[in-house]
Image: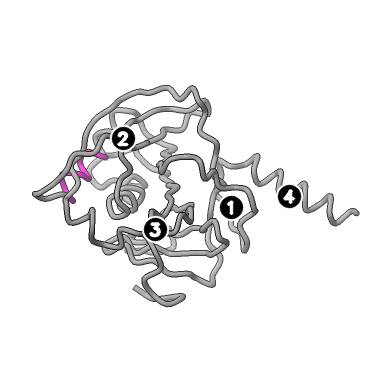
Amino acid sequence: MFFAVAVLHAIIAAVACAGEPSVSAAFPAGTFVRSQPNWIRVSTGTAASIEKAVVAYSKAASRPPARNFTVVLSRDSQGFFVLTFPQPLPAHPFMNLVGWLDAPPSVAGVSGAQGWFTSPRTSVRYALQPDRTNPSGDTLVGFASDGRRVVVYQPEVGLCTVSRQVPATPEPVLPNGLRELRRFNIAVSLEYLDGYNPGFVNTHPPDHKW
């Protein structure tokens, strides 16, 4: 009985601390919100600096032909900035935006990015954040809703499982009353719509080294 209570208290504590990354060998069940859209959370910055960083990424990464996507920048009741996309972003720009917004090279004061993304092919949902153990800064790590620990190689959106422990944050529930701050468009190259692992599925064997 004591063990069961202790486990229950540990799960409750993990959900209550959803704003803080935790290192875990197994992701607690029920901590993905599958009904939510793909979205990115940024902990540090201002509305103006985050918009500037997103636009800077678009200009740096996109080349014609391209298609415009709308970005909605809001703020939740805890003070986090929330990026949502009425027309879901393809996997490549989404993954690279998560990495870019953790430390955009051209905009100071923006950091602390995390993303939640559902594979359009498998419907598996992922909780991802930049791999701060990688000095190259070109990978994300996190958990999948089917229990796998994963790493994402941003340049080609390569995906594989990993055996090492990785940080992950249980997905917060987006409140109905998000305060919209800004709405703007970014250009996404057409090559990213059908290329670079658009279905977001495993592409490499476990523990692959990029």
- Secondary structure under badge 2? helix
Tag 2 residue = 50
Does 99 lie within the magenta span?
Answer: no
| Image location of residue 36, percent across then percent down | 48, 39
Sequence order check, earlier mark of 2 and 3: 2
**Most foreground residue, 17 or 146:** 146
Asked whether the residues under the numbered discs 3 and 4 touch, taking CB atoms below 8 Å apart as contact, a structural biologist would say no
Tag 4 residue = 10
| Image location of residue 165, percent across then percent down | 56, 65
Does 55 lie within the magenta span?
Answer: yes
Inspect the image, locate mark 3, and give the three-letter code of the amino acid beneath it: Arg
Tag 1 residue = 22
Tag 3 residue = 121
- Secondary structure under badge 1? strand
Residue 197, located in which quarter of the rendered image? bottom left
Q: Is residue 209 above or below residue 32?
A: below
Sequence order check, earlier mark of 3 and 1: 1
